[in-house]
Image (tube, rainbow, N blue to C red):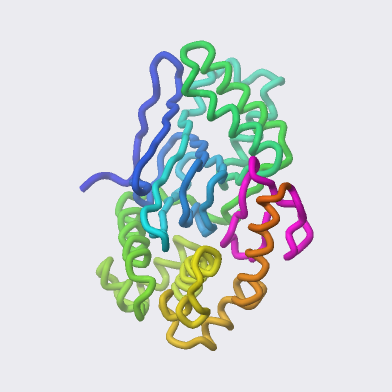
Amino acid sequence: MKPLFQKLTTEPEEGFAFKENRADSFDSPWHAHPEFELVLVVEAKGYRVIGDNLASLEAGDLVFIGPKLPHIWQTEPSPKGRAPAHWFLIQFEEQCLGEGLLKLPAFEPVRQLFRRAMRGLHVVGQTRKQVSAMMRAMPRLNGLDRVVQFLRILIALAKSKECHPIASPDFASESNPLHLERMDRVFHFLHGHLQEDLRLVDAARTVNLSEGAFSHFFRSHTGKTFPHLLNELRIGRACRLLTETDKSISEVAYGCGFESLTNFNRQFRKIKGVRPREFREQMQRCLLDTRRGPTSCPADGRRIAGPTGGVWAGANTSGKCQ
């Protein structure tokens, strides 16, 4: 069995690893590793789980993850067919900067950044645009030029006030390979059967645990009950269908595994803050406005990017454009 606590490789010439990946889907399981990781999603739709946080995955998503923090990216099947994934990532160990350099007073902001990254950081706003541009330029650089670009990225993140924590403060990172392997099996099971009538006992069977033991195991590793996270995953998929297809509300509800339209409407409003129909109308206005240039999202009045900026961040459980 492939270990899910991974030790990643770095480039000996540069001291860190930079990768550009294109695939039909993300190939990493629920896993953790001792390196820091900066991930920029260029193209993909789905969701990501970092620690005990679940959020939608859209083009432009940028996160910085600290060592031993479990995470997984999953692509959702597109209603329109193939949905490829394209992403950049930088991986490095803290020691790659050298003990002497990190101890300098000038590097205190970087040390603070590393401490904050233990919960994972979601990078937004102008910092996301700046760091994304620098990462996109990296394939054209090598050697010393790439090292300098790497340091510029760290400095931009360290100085920014637009890096927001992802996992809960009390989330305990888990590096036990057996637990990571079990959680990976659970996530893949849920991802592949969301449209079905899933019960806690079904998920418990995938990891050979009793219902009681599984409930405790699941909550200790996600910070959520099984029904709560299952509803979040289903509502996240429903958001995409409401945005990208003309399916009726009832078709979306039953296609995402809800047994009744009433329960779907109740769970949707509980998680997103609006009814499914209101969400669809808001998204139609948001997407129309983004084609015209920067504007205000009708959901809450915050500005959203135009054609050259980021896009709606979707199922972040807020139901708002950002």
Q: Position of residue 42 (x, y in %)?
A: 50, 41
**292 sits left or right of 29 in the view:** right
Residue at 52% in and 85% down: 263
Quadrant occupied by the C terminus: bottom right
- Please state if 214 lies on the left or on the right of 171 as rendered: left
Q: Quadrant of residue 63?
A: top right
Which residue occupies the foreground of this view, 292 or 60?
292
| The magenta stretch spans residue 170 | no
Farthest-out residue, top: 144
Does residue 301 show up magenta in the picture? Answer: yes
Vertical comparison of 308 with 287: above or below: above
Is 85 or 187 nearer to us in this picture?
85
Give the residue displayed 61% in from the left and 28% down from the top.
154
Q: Quadrant of residue 7?
A: top left
Is residue 53 visible in the rendered structure shown here?
Answer: no
Q: Is residue 78 visible from the viewing direction of this image?
A: yes
Measuring from the top left, give residue 93's x and y in whole percent: 47, 28
Start and end of the magenta stretch?
294-322
